Image: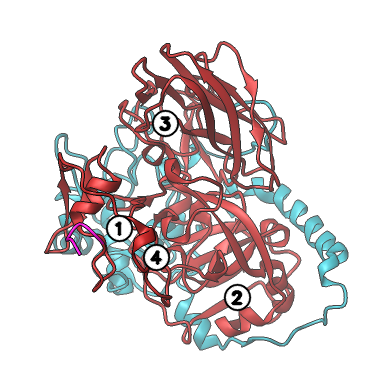
Chain colours: A cyan, B red
């Protein structure tokens, strides 16, 4: 997995402890049966129908592919009305939806975009597939989602204009902003952070 | 009877009576014939007061209504709707005034067709109907939910609702998530789970499994009745003290995993720059307080004034609330209304004799971890100028003018 997630090993230990602790000491569950028997086992088909998430390591990416060129054509029909013709922030123009495109410089940026702020390419695919287009969510085919993802990554100068992406190549894309992410480590106490 | 009195047919006060009798001092929004809100100036001549002792009242009804004289409403924008904190007298938010924030509208979900799927790193992937969820041992808990982007500033004429109306409190009832974890047989190696809603955004957040074992709930009731549609009907995730966005509404799926999913709502949104880094997974809501009276647009007279407001912390109980009535030069301890609950709005009160001079009044909470609510300057010093709009909890100051007008003291802050 990606280096960033190694910092979660501490959490895993903490979770393990809490879990055992909870099972042992939860007074409310004294006298409870091992199982209440409410609910039913979910079928594989039911899980597949809803399990649409994609992780940074590519788990969950479907079969299919998409090119920057196809994505550009789709964007011009299905995305531009809210995100603007180029996807870039235009001074004096208030877009109904966030700007998506910029260079990849984090420091001094005007707005947060995929290029200067998003840490994982998988998120672009996952979000478009589950939530976009705003007025017709979930209406794009997997190939179309790959294509729009490719176009946006290319517009942000992260992949080449002639690129085609699929389940193998998308998780390998390293996003420029990923290196800036830190996990919040505040636990209360007097310090203001 | 005169037009100004109660209309027997529909039980409503006529518009003239309502305006003249109850709300003569302010502008009023009323429904026009087309159902749109229009602004109306108060009439100049007050009407004869209606004498309730001389007129038989209305009989019993199926559903109670707020008094016609009460005009407290949420303040909607395109994406959210804010609780009128300045209108509330205690800590429970009436369900229809609970703030709402959603990313693709409020879905309509048939409770008979509703199912919650739990799968991934479990012994048995399972589906639970709403009926199933209600059969498990249940728990009731009072806590706040606050949006992580709950700070607005910019002008003097701002209400508490406009400044931080994206926090509300309810008494929630449902099943502990740990009870469901136990039922599906969670893999001990699991560290994160994905919570997914069934709205048009199919909104997702990654949550540490430890929160699931600690105090997370799947709730189906709010203030004794079914959860409101805007609050996630028929069931939502409740993570006490954590940012509102993680309390996924209309929840339909929980996937148990061993790493976070890095969804849009936890990468591109709900993260914020801190000195050239981007801080992620700020789950806890930091301690905060605000004086809700006196506050804009109320007006005060010299003499005794009971200052009151709410304080809260996502990390535990409110320990203390300090009040300053001299622009922060000296501080006194406010009285807290008990019982003080964990991760809950806590009401505070402080008696103050105002002599009529211009001054500033402020509140500052200390929570049980020893954290003291910071000023905006402390936050900027700690995080840098480019700190974004999430997790801001600065001390709020109100300016009391000599004529009794109360105005917000806008912070110097780059939005």
Q: Residues within 10 Å of mark 4 (few under 14, many from 20)?
A: few
Secondary structure at badge 4 equals loop
Measure how far apart labels 3 and 2 are at the Cα level.
46 Å
Q: Earlier in the sequence, mark 4 or mark 2?
A: 4
Q: Mark 1 highlights which residue?
A: A150
Which chain is home to disc 1? A
Of residue B368 and residue B329, the one placed in the foreground of this image is B329
Residue B321: percent from left, percent from top: 63, 30
Q: Mark 4 highlights which residue?
A: B65
Q: Tell me where the magenta segment starts and ends, as one range.
A: B1-5
The outermost residue toward the left is: B33
Residue B208 found in image quarter: bottom right
Q: Residues within 10 Å of mark 3 (few under 14, many from 20)?
A: many
Say which of marks 4 and 3 sits in front: 4
Are the residues tagged 3 and 2 within 8 Å (C-beta)? no
Of residue A165 and residue B108, the one placed in the foreground of this image is B108
Measure how far apart labels 2 and 1 are at the Cα level.
32 Å
Measure how far apart labels 4 and 3 are at the Cα level.
27 Å
Secondary structure at badge 3 equals loop
Q: Mark 2 highlights which residue?
A: B118
Say which of marks 1 and 4 sits in front: 4
């Amino acid at each position: 997995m990606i280096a960033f997630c190694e910092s979660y090993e501490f959490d895993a230990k903490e979770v393990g402890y809490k879990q055992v602790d909870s099972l042992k000491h939860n007074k409310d569950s004294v006298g409870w049966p091992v199982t209440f028997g409410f609910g039913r086992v979910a079928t594989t088909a039911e899980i597949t129908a809803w399990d649409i998430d994609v992780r940074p390591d590519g788990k969950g990416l479907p079969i299919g592919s998409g090119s920057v060129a196809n994505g550009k054509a789709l964007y011009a029909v299905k995305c531009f009305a809210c995100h603007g013709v180029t996807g870039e922030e235009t001074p004096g123009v208030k877009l109904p939806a966030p700007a998506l495109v910029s260079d990849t410089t984090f420091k001094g940026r005007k707005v947060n975009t995929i290029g200067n702020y998003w840490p994982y390419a998988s998120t672009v695919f996952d979000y478009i597939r589950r939530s976009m287009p705003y007025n017709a969510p979930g209406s794009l085919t997997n190939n179309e989602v790959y294509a729009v993802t490719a176009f946006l990554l290319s517009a942000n100068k992260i992949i080449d204009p002639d690129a085609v992406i699929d389940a193998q190549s998308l998780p390998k894309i390293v996003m420029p902003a990923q290196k800036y992410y830190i996990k919040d480590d505040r636990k209360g106490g007097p310090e203001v952070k | 009877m005169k037009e100004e009195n109660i209309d027997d047919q529909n039980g409503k006060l006529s518009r003239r009576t309502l305006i003249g009798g109850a709300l003569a001092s302010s502008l009023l929004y009323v429904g026009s014939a087309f159902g749109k809100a229009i602004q109306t100036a108060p009439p100049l001549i007050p009407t004869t007061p209606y004498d309730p002792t001389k007129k038989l009242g209305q009989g019993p009804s199926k559903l109670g209504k707020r008094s016609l004289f009460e005009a407290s409403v949420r303040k909607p924008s395109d994406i959210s709707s804010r609780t009128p904190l300045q209108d509330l007298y205690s800590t429970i938010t009436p369900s229809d005034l609970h703030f709402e924030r959603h990313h693709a509208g409020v879905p309509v979900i048939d409770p008979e067709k509703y199912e919650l799927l739990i799968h991934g790193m479990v012994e048995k992937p399972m589906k639970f109907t709403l009926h199933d969820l209600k059969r498990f041992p249940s728990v009731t808990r009072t806590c706040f939910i606050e949006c992580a982007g709950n700070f607005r500033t910019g002008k003097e004429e701002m209400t508490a609702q406009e400044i931080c109306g994206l926090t509300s409190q309810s008494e929630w009832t449902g099943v502990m998530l740990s009870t469901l974890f136990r039922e599906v047989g969670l893999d001990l190696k699991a560290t994160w789970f994905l919570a997914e809603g069934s709205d048009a955004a199919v909104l997702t957040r990654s949550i540490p499994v430890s929160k699931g074992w600690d105090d997370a709930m799947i709730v189906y009731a709010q203030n004794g009745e079914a959860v409101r549609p805007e609050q996630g009907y028929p069931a939502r995730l409740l993570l006490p003290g954590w940012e509102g966005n993680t309390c996924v509404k209309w929840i339909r799926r929980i996937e148990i995993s061993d790493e976070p999913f890095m969804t849009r709502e936890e990468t591109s949104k709900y993260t914020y720059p801190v000195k050239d880094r981007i801080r992620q997974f700020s789950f806890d809501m930091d301690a905060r307080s605000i004086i809700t009276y006196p506050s804009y647009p109320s007006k005060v007279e010299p003499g005794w004034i009971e200052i009151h407001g709410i304080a809260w912390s996502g990390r535990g109980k409110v320990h203390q609330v300090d009040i300053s009535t001299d622009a922060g030069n000296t501080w006194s301890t406010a009285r807290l209304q008990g019982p003080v609950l964990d991760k809950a709005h806590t009401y505070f009160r402080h008696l103050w004799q105002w002599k009529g001079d211009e001054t500033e009044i402020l509140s500052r909470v200390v929570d049980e971890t020893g954290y003291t609510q910071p000023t905006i300057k402390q936050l900027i010093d700690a995080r840098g100028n480019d700190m974004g709009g999430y997790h801001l909890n600065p001390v709020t100051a109100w300016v009391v003018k000599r004529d009794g007008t109360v105005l917000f003291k806008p912070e110097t802050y780059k939005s």
